[in-house]
Amino acid sequence: MSGFVARLKAEFAEPWRASIEHRFVDELLAGTVSDEVMARYLVQDHRFIDAFVTLVGAAVASADQFESRLRLGRFLGMVCSDENDYFLRSFAALGIGEERHDIPDAAPTAGFKALMKEAAATRSYAAIMAVLNVAEGLYLDWAQRLGDRPLPENFIHAEWITLHDNDFFVDFVGLLKTELGRVGPQDEAVARDFFQRAVELELAFFNSAYEG
């Protein structure tokens, strides 16, 4: 791991650890999270896709290396295909229809969408990489807590885990760490600010799944 990213994770270890060891993660890995909580979580998480695509698109536009742009672009394609398809299949299985669009954004959802759009608008590669390192790196950390245990039987639980722990995703998170380690130290205040706000919003987002 990049020394710079390691320092940020150490500085904000409390909310990072609280997120990856959250009750929601424990129940998801065990396959015991209720349909009600999973539905609430997925409806809100799906709201991120538009802002997230904007953020990754800004990363592609702001990257200063061709190989980085290629790998960011490949990831963007996965989000717009495999990940979005997972949401639609999960909504169908949970009996969630178009009425989901009438559900308002939870406060953490609105906050994280705003943060992603803010980072994208800065065109600061360090700011963008800071948010992406939290949004993806934190998810890899919680997904890898499954270890050698079997996946849950319910595809809604199992695929959400495997979407965030597979060879492609692990490699992509490695790229994000490398990129932030490369550009972050030159724009440290900005990177730290966006990283901190993203970590705090992730924890608030997990909490909100139980605040129906």
Image (tube, rainbow, N blue to C red):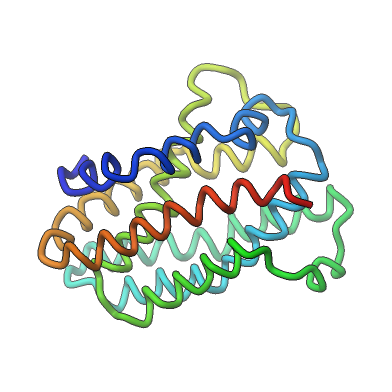
Viewer-proximal residue among 15 and 27: 15
Residue 32 location in percent, x, y?
74, 28
Which residue in the rendered view is the most extreme toward the top? 148
In this rendering, the answer to whether 127 lies above or below 22 is below
Viewer-proximal residue among 96 and 131: 131
Which quarter of the rendering shows the N terminus? top left
In this rendering, the answer to whether 170 lies above or below 57 is above
**Residue sitting at 22 percent across and 63 percent down?**
67
**Residue sitting at 35 percent across and 39 percent down?**
13
Q: Is residue 89 left or right of residue 173?
A: right
Viewer-proximal residue among 81 and 108: 108
Viewer-proximal residue among 70 and 95: 95
**Residue sitting at 48 percent across and 27 percent down?**
145
Residue 17 location in percent, x, y?
43, 35
**Residue sitting at 83 percent across and 54 percent down?**
92
Say which quarter of the image contains residue 70: bottom left
Residue 77 location in percent, x, y?
48, 64
Q: Is residue 25 left or right of residue 127?
A: right
Say which quarter of the image contains residue 3: top left
The number of callouts visible is: 0
Say which quarter of the image contains residue 151: top right
Residue 147 location in percent, x, y?
48, 21
Q: Is residue 120 left or right of residue 39?
A: left
Q: Is residue 84 left or right of residue 78?
A: right
Which residue in the rendered view is the most extreme toward the left? 186
